[in-house]
Image (cartoon, rainbow, N blue to C red):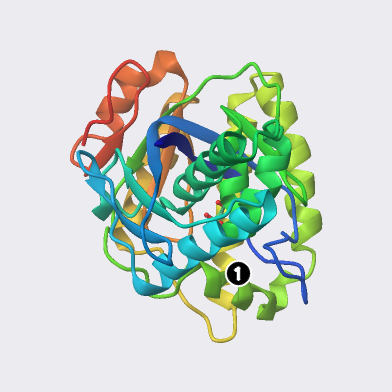
Amino acid sequence: MKIEASAPSNIALIKYMGKVKGSTGNLPTNASLSYSIENMRSFVTLEPAPGDADIWSPLEGLTPIQLSSVGLEKFLNHFKRLKQKFEIPGFYHIRSANNFPADCGMASSASSFAALTLATSQLAVEVTGRPALAKSELSQLSRLGSGSSCRSMFSPWALWRSEGAEPLDLDVRLEHAAVVIEAGKKPVTTSEAHLRVSSSLLFEGRTERAELRLEHLVEALRTKAWRSAYELCWAEFWDMHVLFETSQPHFSYMNADSMRFLKQIQHVWEDTGDGPLITMDAGANVHLFCRPEQVLLAEGWLKGWRTIKSWSSSEVSV
Ligand code: PMV
């Protein structure tokens, strides 16, 4: 028996940053909204393993995931939790990998935890004969392993308020490219960032600001008010990065090259009255989203930068 599953990565335009105090299982302090990147995916296979422990190895033929010992423990613990939930006996060999470069600073935890959750749910159907859970329930389970992975269950738009994500029906298709400013290890892990932001004096009001921006962004996207959408996404990632910069102790992800690219895009908007949406995660890289008809223009904006383009008309191209 061999189970295979895959899930896309997702990038949030309204960010999940900060967890409910005293809670477990990655409950967010505010709602987040993301776009799933269909052709940047993680793949997981499961096969029965001899012995008395689950094991993991990279899935051959794709870009292997480099798992740290902490990362590996988190991944195996999530599988164990899912096996308990689904009452799956025995031990398994988990293989996983991404179809995008590992050293590009693109978080693969969302797609890999979502793919593992999907694979284990298929395994449960196979082994126990019980019907498959709905995507919304799988989203809640995936959240326990990695918060943002709960949004990878839905494409393209996912809205995550508390327990799990739900699809958001928005008639807007976007094209994504990542500008790889820094591919190495981050100075502060995202898990640590979630903890530290609440020490910023500016954290007060963060929930309300994010909720209001979410409401306005959904409206801007629905009405194709691109400039408002751009400004809301811009304000949102700055809000998060200012929390990083004002935490105690403070930390930074942005660097001079991130700023140079941000300024370049700001000029595109100033000069032409139009442009792409941009956002940043807990890292120095910048994510660009454009409308399908802007892809040719985007090629120009991205010239000279190391990029990972996931234009829907082609495979991921670096
Ligand atoms: O799911 P985590 O713990 O890796 O957190 C993701 C946090 C951000 O990428 C910064 C924002 C988001 O909503 O994806």
Q: Which residue corresponds to the image point at 33% horizontal and 26% vertical from the top-left? A: 298
Tell me residue 144's x, y (percent): 65, 58
In the picture shown, does residue 248 fall above or below 39?
A: below
Between residue 273 and residue 182, name the one nearer to us. 182
Q: Quadrant for the C terminus, please.
A: top left
Q: Is residue 153 left or right of residue 165?
A: left
Q: Quadrant of the N terminus?
A: top left
**Location of residue 194 by image quarter:** bottom right
Q: Quadrant of ligand 1?
A: bottom right
Instruction: Tell me the element at label 1.
Output: helix
In the displayed structure, 119 sits above or below 206; it is above
Q: Is residue 27 left or right of residue 236?
A: right
Q: Residue at x 34, y 69 (%)?
A: 68
Residue 46 rendering spot, x and y as whole percentages: 41, 44
The quarter holding residue 267 reads top left
Q: In the rendered view, would you say 195 is above or below 260?
A: below
Numbered disc total = 1
Task: State the image coordinates of residue 112 (x, y, percent, origin top left).
Answer: 45, 48
The 10 Å Cα crowd at callout 1, few under 14, some 14 to 19, many 20 or more, is some
Indicate yes or no: mark 1 CB to ligand 1 under 8 Å: yes
Residue in the picture at 27% in, 24% down: 315
Residue extending furthest bottom?
249
**Residue at the image position 26 percent from the left and 40 percent from the top:** 307
Q: Is residue 15 visible?
A: no
Query: Would residue 198 be visible to someone looking at this image?
Result: yes
Instruction: State left or right for residue 240 relative to residue 259.
Output: right
Give 183 or 230, whichever is nearer the viewer: 183
Indicate the amino acid at tag 1. Answer: His
Question: Label 1, on which residue?
Answer: 194
Query: x, y percentage for residue 153?
Result: 59, 36
